[in-house]
Image: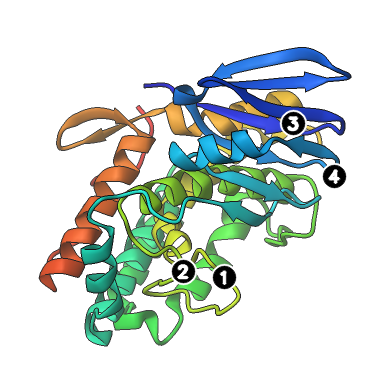
Amino acid sequence: MAYQIVDITQDGYYLHCDRNWLVIEKAKQEVGKVFLGDVLCILAHTRHAVYSHDLLLKISEKNIPLVICDHRHEPVSILTPVSANHQQSRRTYAQAKISQPLQKRLWREIICKKIHEQANSLVAHNPTEAIAMKKMKAIVLAGDTTNVEARAARFYWPILFSKDFRRDKNQCGINAHLNYGYTILRSAMARSVVAAGLIPSLGVGHKNARNSFCLVDDLVEPFRPLVDRLVKENAANWSDDLSTSARQELAGVLSHQIVTEEGRTDLNRVLAILVTSLCKIFEDGKGKLEFPKEIVFV
């Protein structure tokens, strides 16, 4: 199923619900209408938009996140339902009592997979450095206590873009495009985590008391290189400002096909499989996260 992302980028819109349809109006004129069953998330980048109470109820019932973004296209708030799964009580209990050694092992698994996918991003540009980067996985300890993730990032970014590039959320250009793409991934992962009945704020690696989506940020890490590759491939054709065409291209990351053991499937299904495997690990106290062997588009 091809989900749609509703992206509100201009002031003056009124969003409300008509039965099972999301209706968008401006100056009391209807300018858009989307079936709620087809909506993956709503992204709001504007200072002045109005959302009806009925719409907020409907999107909560259907587990459609409303993501409020700042001027850097970074999410500052995500509205998700309190309960979205009949197994929530059992799963949240299992999640809350996970042992520290298991948390550390899971975080090592996530970081190793992230480094592996970052290295895959470098193959087309510098195969020798890609091989060198993959070797970093061998030195990642449980919990990544020596912070190999950060060392890998310092190695990765200059090779992928340029020696002068610095990953900075506050900058425009490439950084703004990365921010937007990551927001798309984060929204989709938040939906999968909430739908599975897990607590988004209770992470295995991220432990920020001010972050309500630590687990989401944990699980999204290995998928970030998908956005990195997309930005790399298109950066020369995109302006520093985040254009409509760039947004559409980045939002399309979720509809691309990825090869799994089940065959080809879209990224949303891949995220759901991963979260389901994590639920089983929480409940059984053992097992491995179910990632595709290679997270690449086909």
Q: Secondary structure at mark 3?
A: loop
- Name the spot of residue 72 as percent of width and height, x first: 77, 52
Residue carrying label 2 = 201
Residue 238 image label: 3
Relative horizontal placement of residue 213, taking residue 29 as reference (left or right): left
**Quadrant including the N terminus:** top left
Q: Secondary structure at mark 1?
A: loop
Q: Earlier in the sequence, mark 1 or mark 4?
A: 4
The vertical placement of 294 against 11, above or below, is: below
Q: Amino acid at mark 2?
A: Ser
User: How far is the residue under mark 4 from the one under mark 3?
Assistant: 25 Å
Give residue 211's quadrant in the image.
Answer: bottom right
Q: Earlier in the sequence, mark 3 or mark 1?
A: 1
Q: Earlier in the sequence, mark 4 or mark 3?
A: 4
Marks 3 and 4: in contact by CB < 8 Å? no
The vertical placement of 23 against 9, above or below, is: above
Residue carrying label 1 = 211
Q: Which residue is drawn at the image coordinates 59% and 58% (left, top)?
A: 157
Residue carrying label 4 = 47
Q: Amino acid at mark 3?
A: Trp
